[in-house]
Image (cartoon, grey):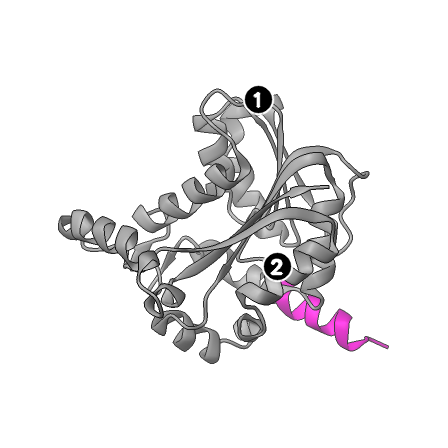
Amino acid sequence: MTTPAEGGLQRQIDFYVRKADSYDRSFWSMGQRENRNHFKKIQAISDALGVTSSSTGSVLEVGTGTGLHAHWFLERTSTTYCGLDVSVPMLAIAKQRVAAWGDRVRLTVGDAQRLPFPDGSFDAAFCAATLHHLQDPAQGVREVARVVRPGGRVALMEPNWKYPTVLVYSASVREEWNTFKINPRRLAEWASSAGVTDITVTPVLYTPPQPKRLERVFDYVDRTMPKVPGLRALSITMLLSGRRI
């Protein structure tokens, strides 16, 4: 007999099996997911982890998907990258995307709520738009923190349902409904309970990735909005960063 939790996990797996081939091209990404906003988000994650172009060490991504983040880290840093995902088809695409980096990258199939790594295995770990797909996102946060060495950095990025397009998408796709259960306060509580300290939760991005001719305007808006009380809460995503105790 399948439990509700097992049924929910299988529904998420099936969802990403169906989406794998089209995941990097969608209406919601305004074409290709590999766009300005994607790079802004991963840069924010990299900054939160303290990873620079000269960084070495090891980075884990929980929910690596098709490997866009993996490609970014491998191309721009000297870190070793480990990516985990529950979807075999998504990881197959990621494997092709990062094949050039050989021994610097490891991809594995696994459950974000039961990571197959010993405590303190990585110098840093992150997930992006992964927690709201879990039956128990707090457990997912505990696992991300557990596999980071003491003093290592943790970053958790999630979509913000207060942003209009995120609201519409999250309401219309069953596998996205848990987005409504996540907010900055709850993220911080989960991280603190998982042994993460020096916690900050910041808004990331307010503008669409297109059209390119408006990028300077978009950059100005993205810099300005976090300074405006009330409006700062309407970002596309939110990013928690902290340090493992």
Task: Kindly tell me whether residue 111 is visible in this rendering.
Answer: no
Residue at label 1? 56
Amino acid residing under circle 2 = Ala
Amino acid residing under circle 1 = Thr
Q: Are marks 2 and 1 in contact (CB under 8 Å)?
A: no
Q: Quadrant of residue 107?
A: top right
The crowd level at tag 1 (other Cα within 10 Å; few <14, some 14-19, many 20+) is some
Task: Give the SS element for disc 2.
Answer: helix
Q: Quadrant of the N terminus?
A: bottom right
The residue under the point 53% across, 58% down is 129
Q: Is residue 63 above or below residue 2?
A: above
Is 109 on the left-hand or right-hand side of 119? left
Q: Is residue 104 above or below residue 213?
A: above
**Residue 187 location (% of width, % of height):** 60, 61
Q: Earlier in the sequence, mark 2 or mark 1?
A: 1
Q: Compare residues 117 and 239 and report the one nearer the observer.
A: 239
The residue under the point 21% across, 51% down is 220
Magenta region: 1-13
Q: Which mark is residue 188?
A: 2
Q: Which mark is residue 83?
A: none
Q: Quadrant of the C terminus?
A: top right
